[in-house]
Image (spheres, rainbow, N blue to C red):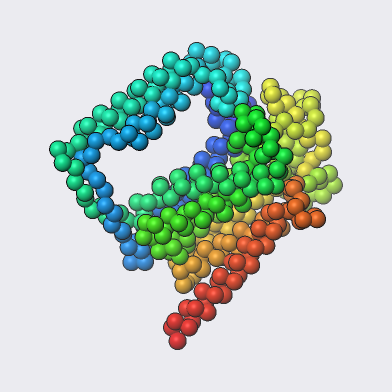
Amino acid sequence: MYPTLYHALLDLFGLDLPFLRFVNSFGFFVALAFVFASWTLSLELRRREHSGLLKGSVRKVVVGAPATAGDLVGNGVLGFLLGFKGLFLLLNFTEATADPQGFLLSGAGNVVGGLLGAALLVFLKWREKKKEQLATPKVEEVRMLPSEHANNITMQAALWGIIGAKLFHWLENPDEFISFIQDPGGDKIFSGLTMYGGLIVAGAMVIRYFIKHGIEPWQGADSAAPGVMLAYGIGRIGCQVSGDGDWGIVNTTFLGPGPKWFWQYDYPNNVNSVGVPLIDGRPCFDGYCTVLPETVFPTPLYETLVCVGFFFVLWSLRKRLSPPGMIFFLYLFLNGLERFFIEKIRVNVHVLGTITQAEIIATLLMLVGIGGMLWLRKRNTAASA
């Protein structure tokens, strides 16, 4: 396993680039997932524009106004944080890269660097607005096509996805929430994320964005669904590569077709440092040198294969299924179906007897998916009668 890109390049190519310790391998694949989701969303929104299924919207903007206090304060805060951490990193590179996440979440930093960073970004924002300033600011109407919203939609999904994933994880593990309240610096905020929490919260906020910006919700949801399925599959590559604990139950006996590691894997150097010391001659990364005592099902790998396959199913059907909303509800059903069955061989927290939170949500997604498709079909038949 490769906890960071530093470990991957060091092991695979012999490249020793300490600054890459800051790039968590799970985070890298999550970022890659959002890139692909944004790309497929933009493609599909553009196709629906050209087909006349989606129309642009008009919004009013103020042109030529000076920088506001909010603009300057926002840039100042961002500049301070960058300078505070950045200058400390340059002056204490070895110390900071020894535990990158601990450094980023700690109070360690350089105040002088923070003040310089704040001053620089405040000045740059003020100068930018000054160049555009008019004697009398004016209001203009700007027409935006739905495809031009793709990046903003992705940013909304990323932000609310992380918030939702963490909140749902804390619902499953209240003791971790209590620990976080008691010692915020001791919790690695990007570890312990529940995929379904991110999906539900991000999905709700994206639908809200569609409505707010005049994008027909069913068309927007259909446009986003294939990319979300693909993003889920890519995100699971990050789980597999980093060994973040999303593995399956112990499997020391069952072997299906293909290589042994496809069915039995022990996650050496996993990012959570779970297991026993790694002493069998395989590469051993400082701070992560552990291996599971027994082999398990590598379930993130299975989810990647299934979800990427489902992406191609949704992508191939996007021009054929009608009315609007069918692709979205089919996505909900397929997502729930995949997750429900993977939970049978996956390690997770039980919330109701032997039932996990993910099984409950997956069941609801399948029911909503089937119910939604039947409802849309019935409504469309009635409308055309």
Against 268, residue 303 (above or below) is below
Which residue is farthest top?
91
**Figure disc tally:** 0
Q: Nearer the viewer, residue 341 or 215?
A: 215
Residue 349, horizontal then vertical, whole percent: 74, 48
User: Quick check: 119 left or right of 186?
Assistant: left
Residue 116, horizontal then vertical, whole percent: 38, 18
Quarter of the figure with residue 219: bottom left
Which residue is farthest right?
253
Residue 353 visible in the current orientation: yes
Against 275, residue 169 (above or below) is below
Residue 10 visible in the current orientation: no
Q: Residue at x 41, y 60 (%)?
A: 211
Quarter of the figure with residue 29: top right
Tell me the quarter of the image containing the N terminus: top right
Q: Residue at x 23, y 53 (%)?
A: 141
Which residue is farthest bottom?
385
User: Quick check: 356 left or right of 233?
Assistant: right
Q: Nearer the viewer, residue 381 or 132?
A: 132
Residue 121, horizontal then vertical, whole percent: 35, 26
Residue 355, horizontal then vertical, whole percent: 76, 56
Tell me the quarter of the image containing the C terminus: bottom left
Against 93, residue 297 (above or below) is below
Q: Residue at x 39, y 33 (%)?
A: 74
Quarter of the figure with residue 246: top right
Q: Residue at x 42, y 29 (%)?
A: 77
